[in-house]
Amino acid sequence: MEEERKGAIDIDSVRVTFTARGEIVEAVSNVDMHVKPGEFVSIIGPSGCGKSTLLNIVAGFVKPTSGSALFDGVPIRGPGSDRGVVFQQYSLFPWLSVRKNVEFGLKMKGTPASQRETQARTLLGLAGLLAFENHYPDQLSGGMKQRVGIVRALATSPQVLLMDEPFGALDAQTRAVMQEILTNMWQQFQISVLFVTHDIEESIFLSDRIYVMTARPGRIKAEITVPLPRPRTPEMTYTPEFIGLVQQLKALIREESLAAMGSELKEGGLSGFGIEVGPRGVEEVV
Ligand SMILES: Nc1ncnc2c1ncn2[C@@H]1O[C@H](COP(=O)(O)OP(=O)(O)OP(=O)(O)O)[C@@H](O)[C@H]1O
Ligand SMILES: [Mg+2]
């Protein structure tokens, strides 16, 4: 019998508030978000709309104030090796070699040393990093460090990869190569991915589905299915379908960025210029 596919995320009616300097900040409000086993889903939205907060709920680092967050049908109570996390900043241990970094999660799980080494070397080979297994993180380029970060997150055989702007610090060329490496690995491992990015083209190139969020407090503004076939190729980015999706997403994001900036500007940002900003925010003055 075929093994049951795992990696389902079910976020229902989730609200998160934080208390900062005595004030209650509503970060996300009434969010429903679903990822099916094996699906690649992205979240985009203006800065501060709660993208990282949602990812951190699934990772088990943040608890919803209300609503429910399930992973494979079970309430999320904390971090676990069934969910691999990759952040924007390279979070490798500088005092460990590349291979020891990859082995770290397996060591925590109690995997015997010889098995750890074999698993780490197999994964490093797939990511084209075997020649660097004995290097230390500060001897690697940014793209290589982030590849090690992905391999490390995959080492414990998670059912989902949670990625928070993982390529944000990379140059455009390296980023494009990383996107191809990630889609290849995702297809080989058949796991789910929940991916946060600011980059509209990146979200389309990688995803099956994209959630667009409103300005804070973040709610789901739109859910877009990407109808492009797999495997994705760089040439697809020149097709009318791709360009149409870019335009659709840009329009949605622009509205929200203006709304977000408008409230900040109304709080005094433009007063020094003698500009009146009404309820429609900066959209009225630009
Ligand atoms: N631990 C915390 N304590 C207080 N406020 C927080 C905390 N974490 C997040 N916030 C606030 O919640 C809101 C959402 O933050 P979050 O980091 O999820 O946004 P984001 O969409 O990831 O933004 P960015 O695109 O800039 O990374 C912001 O207003 C942020 O200041
Ligand atoms: Mg963030």
Image (tube, rainbow, N blue to C red):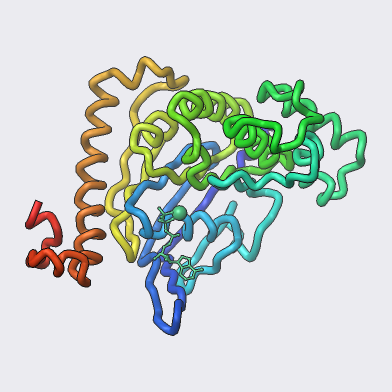
Which quadrant is home to the N terminus? Answer: top right
Q: Does 216 sit above or below residue 136?
A: below
User: Can you give x and y, in whole percent of width and height, for residue 220 in the image?
Assistant: 32, 55
Q: Is residue 254 visible?
A: yes
Nearest the camera: 61 or 283?
283
Please give the name of the residue rendered at 36% of the width and 67% of the height, measured from the top-left corner.
Answer: 29
Quadrant in which residue 151 is drawn: top right
Q: Is residue 7 visible?
A: no
Q: Does 276 sit above or below residue 155?
A: below
Quadrant in which residue 188 is drawn: top right
Q: Does 46 sit above or below residue 123?
A: below
Please give the name of the residue rendered at 67% of the width and 38% of the height, measured from the top-left corner.
Answer: 154
Q: Is residue 116 left or right of residue 126?
A: right
**Ligand 1 placement by image quarter:** bottom left
Please give the name of the residue rendered at 42% of the width and 53% of the height, measured from the top-left corner.
Answer: 33
User: Can you give x and y, in whole percent of width and height, for residue 235 in the image?
Assistant: 37, 15
Q: Is residue 90 left or right of residue 217?
A: right
Quadrant in which residue 256 is drawn: bottom left
Q: Does 114 sit above or below residue 23?
A: above
